[in-house]
Image (spheres, helix red, strand yellow):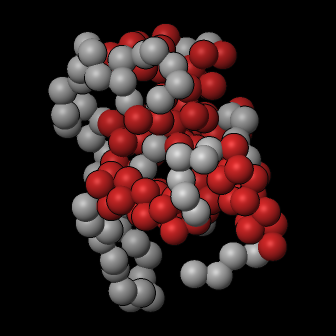
Amino acid sequence: MRLTPAEDRRIAAYLKENPLFDGFGALARKATLEFVASRPSIPLRPETGKPPTPPATAPDALPLSDTRRPAFLWDYDLTEKQVRETLEHGGAGREWLLARILDRAPLPEVLRYATLEEIRDALPDLKLPPGKKEHWEYALRRWLGDG
């Protein structure tokens, strides 16, 4: 694995602040194990030349928990049910929360809370990093056939 000089400096600074890790190797192993635990498989699709099939949009497919905190909200004390309620009631809290979901949650979890159409309609008003917003705009155009 090759890192840019800036990445090398960031890791060195992190290791200096977190002596628990004895070096980059320990940090990389920990990060890899956490990634593998969170995604036991990553579906790969060959490029076929035709538009991709939109993902299933079933936000209510799994029951919501009164106690489980979604992974994308590790730093806030909100349950899945409270997240859903916030998204349903609108307002600035809804925009912030939807942006947080789009920025930090994997696609299956995004679709537990919003449909592709809801995302498309809200996207212009959401505060997302430019690259992330462009990613979502492109994906939605492809999935929804909007150009």
Residues 146 and 33: in front is 33
Residue 145 can be seen, yes or no: no
Give me the residue at 43% from left, 16% from top: 78
Q: Is residue 34 above or below residue 45?
A: above
Residue 74 can be seen, yes or no: yes
Q: Is residue 33 above or below residue 114?
A: below
Residues 21 and 108: in front is 21
Give me the residue at 48% from left, 28% from top: 73
Give me the residue at 46% from left, 57% from top: 31
Residues 12 and 10: in front is 12
Give me the residue at 42% from left, 42% from top: 110
Percent position (x, y) of residue 127?
Answer: 72, 35
Circle count? 0
Is the N terminus in the top left, top right, bottom left or bottom right quadrant? bottom right
Percent position (x, y) of residue 89?
Answer: 49, 11
Q: Is residue 52 above or below residue 78?
A: below
Q: Is residue 50 above or below residue 8?
A: below
Percent position (x, y) of residue 45?
Answer: 34, 79
Is 147 on the left or on the right of 76, as rendered?
Answer: right
